[in-house]
Image (tube, grey):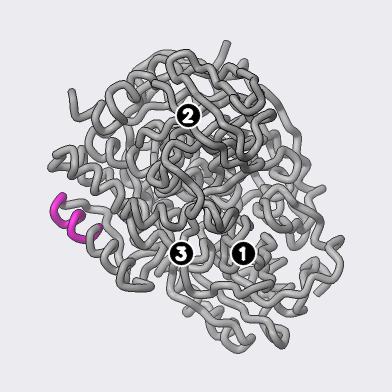
Amino acid sequence: MIVKGKVHRYGDNVDTDVIIPARYLNTANHAELAKHCMEDIDSSFTSVVKKGDIMVAGSNFGCGSSREHAPIAIKESGISVVIAKTFARIFYRNSINIGLAILECPEASEKIEGGDEVEVDFDTGVITNHTKKETYKAQPFPKFIQNIIAKGGLMNSISEK
Amino acid sequence: MGMTMTQKILAAHAGLDKVEAGQLIMADLDMVLGNDITSPVAINEFRKYGFKEVFDREKVSLVMDHFVPNKDIKAAQQTKQCRCFASECSIKNYFDVGDMGIEHALLPEKGLVGPGDVVIGADSHTCTYGALGAFSTGVGSTDMAAGMATGKAWFKVPAAIRFNLTGKLGKCCSGKDVILYIISQIGVDGALYKSMEFGGEGLASLSMDDRLCMANMAIEAGAKNGIFEVDGITEAYCNGRVKHEIKVYKADEDAQYEQVINIDLSSIEPTVACPHLPENGRKASELGDVRIDQCVIGSCTNGRLSDMETAAEIFKGRHVAKGVRCIIIPATQSIYLECVKRGYTEIFINAGCVVSTPTCGPCLGGYMGILAEDEVAIATTNRNFVGRMGHITSKIYLSSPATAAASAVKGYICDPREL
């Protein structure tokens, strides 16, 4: 699968409190959560984000609370993939479980800037930056995790049994 | 090559003789936990995929604590959904207004978690139970749903950092100062994907409350879990409280650690994490003039009885500084009751504090003490991210109960030994 979009760029240690502030956790409604995505770090995000856009950040993306509302809000807002140097572990797990594509790629995290047009090929892990005319290679998922994704998420994979 | 304590527990729960760092395993769960915010998402998933019964009605705990007593209509709906689900599935450990407490104070207090257990919870601070020698980690709602359905969860076996504790804590210092110091040294991703294993002769001077507080904040260093060696203090705590069979695991002599860090507890000083990351720890005595508008003493990190005792000792015969609002939140009903019996509640009220029913409320900016624009708080909670307690320009300083209470009296952040 290939996705292509414009980059929304953030720094290190983007925590789940800024991805979706706790004051909005009184609902589990996906569309409602997406309305407030990134509100406390980038108040214009929800008005400019377009379906297929890509989020790029530094290290430890998604640190803090275990709220699954965070990857849900990002996915529901139209983001096709999040690329970071590293992810906080619960966010990493949650993204796989709900089917939000994420990639760890230190080089891409370093070089991609906000507004760049970027394309990601999930089969090869190759990230192409059309604006800068560069390519970067991401770490592929371990097979075990690829299986969960292939089955359409964790719940699908256990209900199949 | 030997195994760490975490690896031994995981191996036993995966039915394997041996595991090593990086290995993917499927492990049996002894407890699956959720709260009023994360459970609704899990229940929706559980139902959507057609599951009718939980794997074991005694091994699921639902604790209504984040926005409870309900802060608004939407929160009330979420709690109602949890309440109905608990009733439909005959979940034994459902805790609501009247018997609830903050989940990570409540489960150990009720003896629902113990040494050698594998616990997942849809709350990042589930790592708290590592204080008892359990493998316990935070997950999301989908993992919770799958855990409730199957009694299993997948894990990537973590590598570990060993913290070798020596010496004894000095005056006015507690587990909170130790963990804030450690996070200031290794950073908020210093233990990313790893276990933080605590041991050494220094353990003998750390109470169970100190250990619960330290394990609680392992997640703030990015860790998968924090875990303490089991000793006489653990056994005394669990004795008569934990009803299920417990098993004590010890790391092998030749266990592999990615790093060994020595901490001399006697060198720890009252420590404060400055905005906006828990890694910004500095000595309270070196902060300069930081005026505060609010003080919060409570949370899953520091709302236990010894925290209340520390605060009461400081507030006795003293008053909160003019212009400072001080909110004290005992973490469970039984801690609350003990505060009343011991006269702490009276001390707090006479000192000008408010005392709340147990709730996570202000820690995550939910309710019960939201900060306005540019306001400054000192809190015994666990996170000081941008906007965590309210307005995005507000600031949070994290500290121990002693430092928070002393600062509330002075009106600015101070070293509690100054009082």
Amino acid carrying label 2: it is Lys
N-terminal of the pair, mark 2 or mark 3, is 2
Q: Is residue B124 visible?
A: no
- Could you tell me the amino acid type at mark 3? Arg
Image quarter in which the C terminus of chain B is found: bottom right
Q: Chain of mark 2?
A: A
Discs 3 and 1 carry the same chain letter:
no
Q: In front: mark 2 or mark 3?
A: 2
Q: Nearer the viewer, residue B373 or B354?
A: B373
Residue highlighted by disc 2: A4
Q: How many marks?
A: 3
Q: Chain of mark 1?
A: B
Label 3: few (<14), some (14–19) or many (≥20) C-alpha neighbours in 10 Å:
some
Image check: A28 left or right of A91?
Answer: left
Which residue shows up at 67% across the image and 73% down it? Answer: B375
Residue under circle 3? A23
Callouts 2 and 3 close, C-beta under 8 Å: no
Element under label 2? strand
Question: Gap between marks 3 and 1, in whole Å?
Answer: 12 Å
User: Of the numbered discs in the image, which one, if any, rests on residue B392?
Assistant: 1
Magenta stretch containing residue B87, yes or no?
A: yes
Q: Position of residue A32 (x, y in %)?
A: 36, 57
* Residue B373 image offset from top left, x and y in percent: 64, 73
